Amino acid sequence: MEEALEAGVTPILAVGMEQASSERALELREKYPAALRVAVGLHPSEIPSLEAEELRAELAFVEQTLRDADALGEVGLDYRDAVDEEQRQRQRQALRQQLEWAEHERKPLSMHCRRAEHEIVDLATQFVQRTALGVNLHWFTHSEKLAHVCGEKGIYISPGPSILSSEPQASVARSIVPGYLLVETDSPVEFGGEPARPAWARKVAQALADLRGESLESLAQRLQENVERYLRST
Ligand SMILES: [Zn+2]
C-alpha cells in the first residue's frame, strides 16, 4: 500500500477470493480508508474443491459482509478450473446468487472469466441494464471485438501487467473504449517470475498511454474519472 501510494496509485480495489482473503481486505481498509476499496466475493476457481457445506458457508459470508464492502468480487466463471458440467453448474449457481445480492445491496462488480467469455459478457450486460451499476471484467484480453462490445454495453475492462510483454494482449488493451478503461495488476499473481505489486499500476498505465498515443497525465485523469464512476453505488 505504501509503495503504491508513493507511485500515485489510488484508489485501489482489493478483491477477495473467499472468506479469508475478503476478511484481510476489509481489515486493511481500516488502515487505509481513503485509498482502499474492498470487494468481497467467492471466486469461481475456489468452488470445485469446496464441499456442499463449505460452499454454503462461503456464500453466507458474502451475503453477510457485502453490505459493508464497496463491491462484489472476484466472482465469475472459470471453465478451465471447472472440469465438468456439474462443476460449471455450481459456479453458475454461486454466481447467480452473488449477483442477486449485489443488485439488492447496490454494489458494483469485479468479474473474473476464463473460457466463458461470451457467457460473462451476457451476464455483465444484463446486470448493467438492470442496475446501472459498474461492472469490471478484470484482465479481460479476449479479443478486440469483445473489447468494443463491452464499451457499447457500458462494461469496464482493466488490463494488467500482461500488456507489458504480450503483443496480442496489448493490442486488445489499445482498443478498449476510453470511457470504460481501468488498470489493474492482479497482485500478487506472478509476471515475469515475480509477484505483481499494486504500484505496478503506474507502469501499466504508462504502457497504455504509449500504446494509445497519449500522455500519462491525460490517461491518468481519465482513469481517475472512470474508477470513480465504476465504484459509484447510486
Ligand atoms: Zn481473476
Image: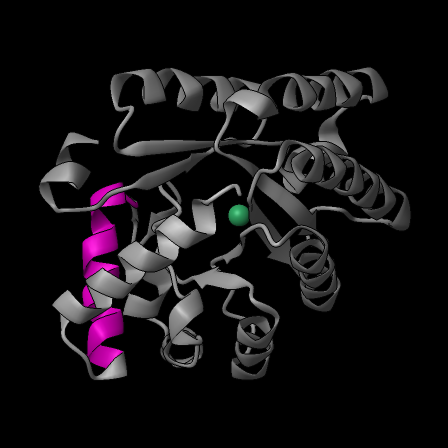
Q: Position of residue 27 (x, y in %)?
A: 38, 15
- The number of numbered badges drawn on the structure is 0
174 over 223 or under it: above or below: below
- Residue at x-position 19% and y-position 78%: 210
Compared to residue 52, the image places residue 167 above or below, namely: below
- Whether residue 65 is in magenta: the answer is no
Q: Position of residue 100 (x, y in %)?
A: 76, 38
| Secondary structure mostly taken by the magenta-highlighted segment of the chain | helix
Where residue 34 sits, quadrant-wise, is top left
Q: How is the image coloured?
A: one colour
Percent across and percent down for residue 221 are 21, 62
Q: Quarter of the image for the N terminus: give it.
A: top left
Please state the horizontal and vertical placement of residue 81, each as a whole percent of the image: 69, 47
Residue range highlighted in magenta: 196-211
Quarter of the image where one finds residue 54: top right
Q: Is 155 displayed left or right of 220 in the figure?
A: right
Residue at screen point 34% across, 50% down? 185
Q: Is residue 117 left or right of residue 214?
A: right
Which residue is rendered at x = 34% and y = 68% of the image? 163
Residue situated in front as seen by the camera: 72 or 222: 222
Residue sitting at the far left: 6
The residue most toward the right is 86
Question: Is residue 204 one of those drawn in magenta?
Answer: yes
Above or below for 120 versus 98: below
